[in-house]
Structure formats: structure tokens, C-alpha cells
């Protein structure tokens, strides 16, 4: 699937919630041979979770993603009908580790800020911007980034969404 190779790691640093609970942390590793793409997402759900106008997402195959520590601390929050966000079960940390989306059954959408800083340079820069229909930013801002822009995932009806895992990249819908 990918010409990339090697292993990258990430997770959430140990922390406490201010109580007597022990620190909890989560670690994962990704085999880069399962790399599909990296994109910037402007959807309303990513904005709500990250508190930023865009979110940096690494898309990899499920087979290439492995939680190596702290799986027992993961909690699933269903943030929209087809989307589940995985984060630490801890009142002090609402950072989304990855997203599991129905219809993308073979893919995991990993939030780039959770990848170890030393490993982030091993991943290509984002190749496109998705969900501009939800954006609160001006068109001038987005066009200044010089990336292909999409109103939705791959199109308004998302009927071609499954082919993303097969390397399909449609023409941009927004110019």
C-alpha cells in the first residue's frame, strides 16, 4: 500500500486527574507500510474536539496500528452518527488519540499531535484539506495553504469513501 517503511510511536504522556487515581497513559505504534494519507480536516467535530480551526490527521490501515500500553484506559465517545473518537478515560484528558469511522472499516484516523515529536518528520506533509463545507475559516486562508480542497471527504455524498483505502484520490471539488 505504501512506499514508507519503519515504525513510529505516539500516545498520551502520563498524567493525573488531581485525585488519588494513579497516572494513566496510552502508547501506540504504527507500521508506516500501512500509511494511506495525511490530511487537514476542517469538520465541525474535529474543531470541537481539538479547539482549533483545522486538525492534522494521519490515515493508516487498522493492521498497521497497535496499542502497546494503556488500552484499558481508552473510552469511546460517539461524536456523530458514523464516528467514534477514542480518548483516555480520565477527566483531565480529552485529547482524541484516534478516530474510528464506520464505512472506513479497514482504516484508523490518528490525530497527528499524539505522534511522538521525534517521529512526526517521518510522515509526509498533509496532501489535502477535507470538509471545507464545515469550515469557519475564509477561503483566502485555505487557498493560501496550496493544497487540494474538498467540500466533504471525497464528495458531497461520500459514496466513493471506501475507495480511499485503495489509493483512490479524486480531483478537488473546490478550487
Image (cartoon, helix red, strand yellow):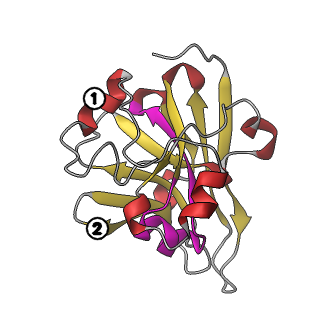
Is residue 100 rendered to the left or right of residue 129?
Answer: left
Distance from the alpha carbon under mark 2 to that under mark 1: 22 Å
The mark that comes first in sequence, 2 or 1, is 2
- Which residue appears at 51% of the width and 33% of the height? 37
In the rendered image of this protein, does residue 63 appear above or below residue 41? above
Is residue 89 something that shows in the picture?
no
Is residue 41 something that shows in the picture?
yes
The N terminus - image quarter = top left
User: Which region shows up in magenta?
Assistant: 41-62
Is residue 164 rendered to the left or right of residue 81?
Answer: right
Determine the residue located farthest toward the right in the rendered image: 118
Is residue 121 rendered to the left or right of residue 1?
Answer: right
Across and down, in percent, residue 70 comes to 56, 53
In the rendered image of this protein, does residue 120 appear above or below residue 71? above
Residue identifier under label 2: 80
Task: Give the SS element for disc 1.
Answer: helix
- Which residue appears at 39% of the width and 29% of the height? 169
Residue identifier under label 1: 163
- Which residue appears at 62% of the width and 79% of the height? 92
In the rendered image of this protein, does residue 117 appear above or below residue 52? above
Amino acid at each position: 500500500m505504501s512506499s514508507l517503511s519503519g515504525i513510529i510511536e505516539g500516545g498520551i504522556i502520563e498524567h493525573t486527574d488531581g485525585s488519588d487515581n494513579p497516572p494513566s497513559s496510552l502508547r501506540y505504534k504504527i507500521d508506516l507500510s500501512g500509511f494511506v494519507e495525511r490530511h487537514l480536516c476542517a469538520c465541525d467535530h474535529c474543531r470541537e474536539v481539538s479547539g482549533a480551526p483545522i486538525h492534522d490527521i494521519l490515515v493508516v490501515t487498522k493492521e498497521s496500528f497497535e496499542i502497546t500500553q494503556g488500552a484499558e484506559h481508552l473510552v469511546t465517545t460517539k461524536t456523530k452518527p458514523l464516528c467514534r473518537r477514542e480518548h483516555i478515560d480520565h477527566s483531565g484528558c480529552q485529547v482524541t488519540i484516534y478516530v474510528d469511522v464506520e464505512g472506513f472499516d479497514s482504516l484508523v484516523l490518528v490525530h497527528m499531535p499524539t505522534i511522538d515529536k521525534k517521529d512526526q518528520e517521518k510522515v509526509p506533509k498533509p496532501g489535502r484539506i477535507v470538509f471545507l463545507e464545515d469550515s469557519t475559516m475564509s477561503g483566502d486562508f485555505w487557498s493560501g495553504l496550496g493544497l487540494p480542497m474538498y467540500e466533504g471527504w471525497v464528495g458531497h455524498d461520500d459514496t466513493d469513501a471506501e475507495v480511499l483505502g485503495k489509493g483512490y484520490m479524486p480531483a478537488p471539488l473546490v478550487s
